[in-house]
């Protein structure tokens, strides 16, 4: 029986009344659409004879495999294509396509005894079926990855079968690794056929559907606001995750809640089926002062425990802190607009959101759905929603920009089209460059957010009237070079972070294998209150900062001026910084433009007797930005006592200790940093740390992009200090860095800094926070003019 999760949502309508609506939102795993639900917009690929004749002429697909796929499991699946009346000519092709969110193990056809081996056979007279693996051009978006099967030495007639085995283990292989990302909706093993090899494939309407579901709980996470107002109430969110970070919707544990100094929380809570892996506790009473954390522990499995971020209590604060996600994707067959918003509001823990589907994917009906869902889900004091989309033109025309409207009723202007059927689109709303788009908008009602996604935003088109900030971090990677370009061009912009995944998982998105590189980020804003008007006003004033996804508090001011604001000054300017972390604070840097002018270095409770080795950066500013790091860390003249993974974004990234005492690594960065923290025992005077390996570029489809380069670094252990030793690795900010490292750094840091009088000059002052676990936060600048 399908389960639903209920949300009572207050919605403001034109009359000014507030209605309570019982909105039935599908569970996090969503629901499937029937086979014959293909809408008019997408019918051209079903063949010129029409949908009614599709099965008879072009056949159909079936599968006897289990309909539910556990995320990341190793198994074997079969899919069968039944040939239609058109048959398949010698040289004709059959396509088995997969949604881009299905990050299967890397298909291969060369080693039957190896992992991820795929095969095809037929009951027909064709003697040979060849399989070509196409990672990005096998079919139309979003089913662009798949197997292209060519019929050789004979043809196929109606009633013949083609059976494809994913993870064929008959040759001794272990099967294939299933997708690691759970889906809100059913997704097809989509068949398409090109019967006459006419390069004109037709979609087989009846294709089997599958659902990727979460595995067992692997860990708990707890979070709440990083700032709260004394005497008011707040909330606590506890969620269960599988090993990949998906919502562990089957979790039914009983947790003990340890919240000293906090009233309004139960001592215990039993997770229920309707929780779907998360529970939000309301009406938590905020004490009069101090900083607080809450710890939750599963009573039966004590390793399942989590501690919240530090909540700092403020008395009568001028501004309040809210965090959310302005930029996520939900491609066709990944999530409905309701599932997208429900995830952000629920499991994602977001307090505000917007929509960001690519304009070239949006039909008029879908744009209407966005308007409707924005109005329904928007609720002052709980969850603020801004209608929007992503204008996705090529970089030469302006590049990727989120278009975010204050309220419903805005027009959808498209940069182009990517769907199969363009009927119903209005050419009068085409806007093929950013400057032309801006001529149709009003800055009071709409703002744009330039970002680095599939396409790179072009700051030659930057317009401060419409663009209060840029996005410098998302699932695509970390882009401090984009931040520096703002200063190089003399622009005035704040900084944010987002998810920008393709799975409809705002607020808490995971990268998966290949397509994305890092966990999604969030944006936090200082506003007067949690309403559309107040949050919008704060956005326009750039009172924002971004994080790599953690609820880090970053309060950056100069006297009464907040981050994002402008100051006219004659004498030296003083700045105050307050940070509370989700882990210890390793370092806080203050910059003036691209120049570092002050650093706070955290003092750990435990001395820096460990060694931190990190590798970071990107291969390129373009699509092939991911860097593959492969190699080993060795220590001669000493033994490695233990090691910890540092900032690795996904379980598929490898870090292991071999029998000969080497730490082998195989990870991906895209501007961010990965690494290892090593504990070493007594060592010889001449003990050496050595890193050998290679770096190379790849694109987001896992394809090699060249640029291979060797790594070789060596240093005496006794020469290492708490200051980084850097080894340049080419690319964009790509380097190795080695330093000594402590543990248990302070969770709360507060200090003031005044620029030296001899250095006073105009500039944009901003803050970067680095936690000991590698999490980062970036403030918007305070702009000082003299």
Image (tube, rainbow, N blue to C red):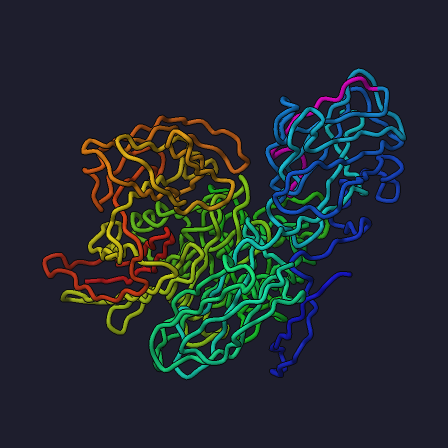
Residue 391 shows in this picture: no
Image coordinates of residue 353 in percent, x first then y, are: 53, 63
Where, quadrant-wise, is the C terminus in this rendering? bottom left
As drawn, 171 above or below 444: above
Of residues 536 and 436, the one drawn nearer to the viewer in this rendering: 536
Image coordinates of residue 660 in percent, x first then y, are: 38, 29
Task: Judge left or right: residue 769 versus residue 785.
Answer: right
Residue 237 shows in this picture: yes
Task: Judge left or right: residue 80 versus residue 766.
Answer: right
Residue at horizontal 33 percent and vertical 42 percent from the top: 678
Q: Which residues are magenta?
A: 126-142
As drawn, 13 above or below 79: below
As drawn, 723 above or below 266: above
Image coordinates of residue 438 in percent, x first then y, are: 48, 56
For residue 140: magenta? Answer: yes
Of residues 100 and 214, the one drawn nearer to the viewer in this rendering: 214
For residue 43: magenta? Answer: no
Of residues 706 and 745, the one drawn nearer to the viewer in this rendering: 745
Residue located farthest toward the top when viewing the structure as drawn:
153
Of residues 521 and 245, the one drawn nearer to the viewer in this rendering: 245
Number of disc labels:
0
């Amino acid at each position: 029986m399908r389960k639903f999760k209920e949300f009572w949502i207050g919605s403001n309508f034109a009359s000014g009344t507030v209605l309570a609506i019982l909105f039935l939102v599908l569970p996090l795993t969503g629901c499937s659409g029937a086979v014959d639900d293909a809408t008019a917009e997408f019918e051209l690929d079903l063949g010129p004879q029409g949908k009614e004749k599709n099965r008879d002429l072009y056949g159909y697909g079936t599968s006897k495999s289990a309909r539910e796929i556990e995320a990341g499991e190793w198994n074997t699946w079969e899919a069968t294509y039944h040939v239609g009346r058109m048959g398949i000519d010698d040289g004709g092709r059959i396509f088995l396509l997969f949604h881009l969110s299905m990050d299967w193990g890397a298909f291969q056809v060369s080693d039957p005894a190896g992992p991820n081996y795929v095969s095809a056979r037929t009951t027909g007279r064709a003697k040979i079926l060849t399989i070509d693996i196409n990672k990005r051009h096998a079919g139309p978006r979003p089913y662009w990855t798949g197997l292209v099967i060519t019929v050789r030495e004979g043809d196929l007639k109606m009633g013949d079968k083609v059976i494809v085995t994913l993870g064929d283990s008959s040759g001794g292989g272990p099967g294939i690794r299933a997708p690691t990302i759970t889906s809100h909706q059913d997704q097809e093993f989509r068949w398409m056929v090109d019967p006459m090899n006419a390069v004109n494939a037709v979609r087989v309407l009846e294709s089997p559907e599958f659902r990727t579901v979460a595995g067992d709980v692997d860990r708990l996470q707890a979070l709440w606001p990083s700032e709260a107002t004394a005497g008011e109430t707040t909330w606590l969110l506890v969620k269960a995750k599988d090993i990949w970070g998906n919502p562990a919707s089957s979790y039914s544990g009983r947790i003990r809640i340890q919240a000293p100094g906090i009233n309004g929380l139960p001592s215990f809570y039993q997770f229920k089926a309707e929780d779907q892996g998360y529970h939000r506790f309301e009406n938590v009473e905020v004490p009069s002062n101090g900083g607080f954390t809450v710890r939750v522990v599963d009573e039966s499995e004590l390793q399942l425990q989590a501690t919240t971020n530090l909540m700092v209590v403020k008395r009568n604060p001028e501004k309040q802190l809210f965090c959310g996600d302005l930029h996520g994707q939900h491609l066709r067959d990944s999530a409905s607009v309701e599932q997208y918003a429900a995830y952000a509001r629920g499991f994602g823990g977001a307090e505000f959101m917007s929509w960001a589907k690519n304009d070239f994917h949006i039909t008029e009906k879908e744009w209407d759905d966005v308007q409707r869902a924005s109005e329904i889900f928007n609720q002052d004091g709980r969850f603020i929603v801004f209608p929007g989309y992503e204008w996705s033109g090529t970089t030469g025309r302006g590049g990727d920009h989120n278009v975010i409207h204050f309220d419903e009723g805005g027009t959808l202007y498209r940069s182009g089209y990517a769907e199969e059927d363009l009927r119903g689109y209005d050419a009068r709303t085409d806007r093929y460059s950013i400057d032309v788009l801006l001529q149709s908008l009003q800055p009071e009602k709409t703002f744009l957010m330039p970002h680095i996604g599939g396409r790179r935003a072009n700051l030659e088109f930057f317009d401060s009237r419409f663009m209060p900030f840029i996005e410098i971090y998302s699932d695509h990677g970390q882009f401090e070079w984009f931040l520096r370009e703002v200063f190089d061009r003399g622009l005035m912009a704040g900084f944010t972070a987002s998810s920008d995944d393709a799975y409809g998982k705002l607020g808490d998105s995971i990268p998966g294998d290949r397509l994305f590189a890092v966990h999604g980020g969030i944006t936090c804003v200082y506003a007067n209150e949690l309403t559309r008007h107040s949050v919008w006003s704060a956005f326009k004033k750039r009172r924002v900062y971004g994080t790599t996804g953690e609820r880090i508090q970053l309060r950056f001011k100069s006297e009464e001026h907040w981050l994002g604001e402008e100051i006219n000054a004659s004498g030296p300017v003083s700045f105050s910084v307050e940070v509370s972390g989700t882990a210890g604070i390793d370092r806080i840097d203050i910059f003036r433009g691209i120049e570092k002018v002050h650093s706070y270095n955290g003092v750990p409770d435990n001395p820096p007797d460990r060694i931190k080795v990190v590798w970071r950066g990107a291969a390129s500013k373009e699509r092939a930005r991911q860097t593959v790091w492969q190699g080993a860390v060795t220590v001669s003249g000493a033994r490695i006592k233990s090691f910890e993974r540092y900032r690795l974004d996904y379980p598929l990234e490898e870090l292991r200790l071999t029998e000969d005492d080497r730490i082998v690594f195989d990870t991906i960065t895209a501007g961010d940093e990965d690494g290892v923290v090593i504990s070493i025992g007594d060592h010889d005077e001449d003990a050496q740390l050595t890193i050998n390996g290679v770096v190379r570029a790849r694109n987001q489809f896992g394809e090699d992009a060249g640029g291979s380069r060797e790594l070789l670094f060596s240093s005496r252990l006794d020469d290492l200090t708490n200051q980084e030793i850097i080894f340049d690795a080419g690319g964009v900010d790509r380097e190795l860095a080695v330093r000594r490292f402590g543990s248990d750094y302070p969770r709360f840091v507060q200090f003031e800094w005044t620029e030296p009088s001899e250095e006073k000059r105009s500039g944009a002052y901003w803050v970067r926070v680095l936690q000991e676990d590698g999490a980062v936060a970036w403030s918007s600048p305070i702009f000082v003019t003299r």
